[in-house]
Image (cartoon, rainbow, N blue to C red):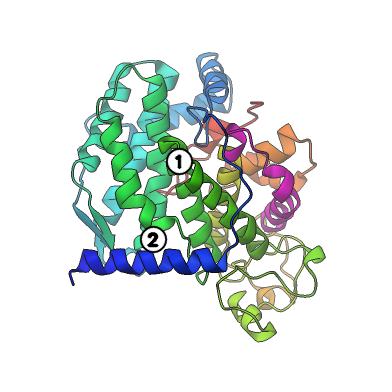
Amino acid sequence: MSGPARRRLAAALAAVTALIMIPPPAVAAPPVFRHPGVLVSTPQLDFVRGRVNAGAQPWRTAFDRLLASPYASLSRTPKPRAVVECGPYSKPDNGCTDEREDAIAAYTLSLAWYVTQDTKYADKAVAIMDAWSAVIRDHTNSNAPLQTAWSASSWTRAAEIIRHTAPNWPGAGRFATMLRTVYLPEVVNGRANTNGNWELTMMEATLGIAVFTEDRATYDRAVGIFRTRVPAYVYLASDGALPKTPPGSGIDTRAEIIAYWHDQSTFVDGLSQETCRDFTHTGYGLASIANFAETARHQGQDLYAEIRDRLRHAMGLHARYQLGEAVPSWLCGGSVKRGLGPVLEVGHNALANRLGIPMSSTRRLVEQQRPEGTNNLFVAWNTLTHAENPH
């Protein structure tokens, strides 16, 4: 049996297992999808364009930095591969960085197009997306699901803006086929027994693909997994003495839970499953939680109402220690690895600005880090798109 055939069989078996382990989600998908609607919406983009054109801050500086970045270059040469091979921490890196950065470039150029209305940016975004959709066929090695998720998260944001606001994209159908056949099978069933940032990013990518391809069943499946993963990633005292566990993970006993939470045995509101691993990976998870809820909101579904307490406590806890608050001895043995990254703007805008929840530590860190740029994986330009955005 060939390698691709083995992977398809493994994916099919995983799908059957996942269907057994995870109960069918309540219907969540909208009767009519709203476009553009992956992370950003038309009202949000119009707000951004107005603020940039008015020279208002922080949007003007954020946009200037976007335009000055290599991702906005009109001379960029995409580097598509038929097979992208990514091991742990992208070792080996056979197309991993190229794929992620080309996807971020497509999103960067799509934002540049919308703000300036200069079609040269839209044309370049299309050229990059068309180059990949003509070539990519598979992702391999141990980091394939995460690599696929990171790239698809950026691809779908770019594709939504270009397909629904730019003058013309003849290759949009082929790009949708690429998302359905190359990317979706790697992410749609999640990965319950990994660190939580994996599955959260996989669900962010799955939801984006579902919106772009108008796949209601996939949308519902992503929401179903998201609703179980978020409580298993961020602890609240109302969960009981121990955190919840991801369905299908096989993590059951107290010892297994503590080991899964990187040897943390004291649990407080906002603690993440990866807090004692490091803040960088925790930030990936928090970013995907907020990004997922933001996309769902654009589709008419309020998931913030379900996750707001977990997200606000998690952002606040990590913001305090990122800002330099002394780490108590009960937390991660009295030492944390900081490095939260540009990951708070979307969640902060949703909770503090739109919902009016006081978040002093989070606001302080967000304002200190502005303008947020990109983590070169899947987070990009969130100050531009979401800072104080009322829509």
Residue beneath the point at 69% across and 43% down: 304
Q: Is the magenta stretch mostly helix, strand or loop?
A: helix
Query: Tag on residue 215?
Result: 1
Distance from the alpha carbon under mark 2 to that under mark 1: 20 Å
The residue lying toward the viewer, choosing from 153 and 64, is 153
Left or right: where does residue 176 sit relative to residue 187?
left
- 384 up-or-down from 319: above or below: above
How many other residues sit within 10 Å of disc 1, few (<14), some (14-19) or many (≥20)?
A: some
Q: Where is residue 16 in the image (x, y as percent from the top left)?
A: 45, 66
How many other residues sit within 10 Å of disc 2, few (<14), some (14-19) or many (≥20)?
A: many
Q: Is mark 1 on a helix, strand or loop?
A: loop
Q: Which amino acid does label 2 sit on?
A: Pro
Query: Tag on residue 117?
Result: none
Magenta highlight on residue 89: no
Q: Which amino acid does label 1 sit on?
A: Asp
Left or right: where does residue 322 sit relative to residue 210?
right
Q: Earlier in the sequence, mark 2 or mark 1?
A: 2
Classify residue 176 by image quadrant: top left
**Circle 2 or circle 1, nearest the eye:** 1
The residue lying toward the viewer, choosing from 241 and 223, is 223
Classify residue 300 by image quadrant: top right
Q: Where is residue 66 in the image (x, y as percent from the top left)?
A: 42, 32
Q: Where is residue 62 in the image (x, y as percent from the top left)?
A: 50, 31
Query: Tag on residue 145?
Result: 2
Q: What stretch is highlighted in magenta?
A: 296-320
Residue beneath the point at 42% across and 67% down: 14
Residue 87 in sight here: no
